[in-house]
Amino acid sequence: MLDKNDIKKTIVKNYHELLYREPDLDGFNYYYSSILDKKISIDDVSSIIKQSEEYKTISKKKEEFDVNFFEKKIYSQFGEDGAINFIFSVIGYTNQFFIEIGVGDGTECNTRNLLENGWKGIMIDTIENNPAFIKKEHIIAENVNNILEKYNVPKEIDLLSIDIDFNDYWVWKAITVTKPRVVVIEYNSTFPPDVSKVVDYDPEGGATWTSYYGASLLAYTKLGKSKGYDLVACENAGVNAFFILHDEVVRHKINLKDIKEIYRPPKYGDVWDGVPRGWALNRREMSDI
């Protein structure tokens, strides 16, 4: 006799793996009752789902490596949770280890969902009185490698996420003690994709809530290339960019797109004429790079 819990788990697993979502009530009830009534077998669930138009659309988007289609907010600020899950559904996992630098209090960040789904890693922020699992550190280019070594991070990991509102570019550039397969990093979408700009390095630099922060998408793309990464996506809000190791891109036959197609303008910050334009313009010039 079939175990009812096994039936439920199988249905949910198929929805997660094939449709990238939770089962809707009608769909779940259909499969559950049909299996109990022996109208279908538990092994039929995947083949039936694969005949659906929804699955065919998803398969097409997966083949196109359309990261934006899979965006979903669970704990992330925007759609990063879904984007990250999709990327790893394509390239697979190794040690399921992450590093996230800049997590706030951990309630809204890019790795909380991973942590709650079996991953291990290091969360870092400067905030006082954070939960014990978040390491309190002030990360700068000069100390980032020593701090990561202090926490015994593996030499190769699955994911690195950086969001420190200012020196992100310089910190990523400095990291040498670990090699992530995927990098998620905040970019300055105030600048169009043909402009390469970065803030002047300042170890005391922090959020200005203006357009003077981080680096433009093109600057990150150049840096990524120098470290062996390809730009694969920007999430729709124009906040985070996603990079994958070039070797993984080749291995999994990921079709790369032009930076102009990948770039997303800001959908946050000050609103002019009804359109979000990002943070207020800062008169201080960022440097060409």
Image: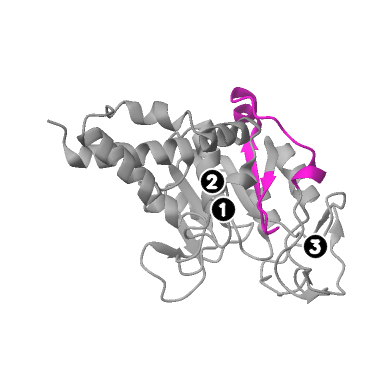
Mark 2–mark 1 distance (CA, rounded to whole Å): 6 Å
Q: Is residue 187 visible?
A: yes
Q: Is residue 281 left or right of residue 223?
A: right
Magenta-drawn stretch contains 245: yes
Q: Nearer the viewer, residue 9 or 265?
A: 9
Residue at label 1? 80
How dense is the environment of label 1, judged by Cα within 10 Å: few (below 14), some, or many (20 and up)?
A: many
Dividing the picture into quarters, in which one does residue 3 lie?
A: top left
Q: Quadrant of the N terminus?
A: top left
Residue at label 3? 190
Q: List x then y, in percent, for residue 140.
A: 62, 61
Q: Is residue 123 left or right of residue 174?
A: left
Q: Is residue 146 visible?
A: no
* Local SS, label 3: loop
Q: Amino acid at mark 1?
A: Glu
Mark 3–mark 2 distance (CA, rounded to whole Å): 24 Å
Q: Earlier in the sequence, mark 3 or mark 2?
A: 2
Dividing the picture into quarters, in which one does residue 276 lie?
A: bottom right
Mark 1–mark 3 distance (CA, rounded to whole Å): 19 Å
Residue at label 2? 84
Q: List x then y, in percent, for residue 80.
A: 56, 53
Check if mark 2's residue and mark 1's residue have beta carbons within 8 Å.
yes
Q: Earlier in the sequence, mark 1 or mark 3?
A: 1
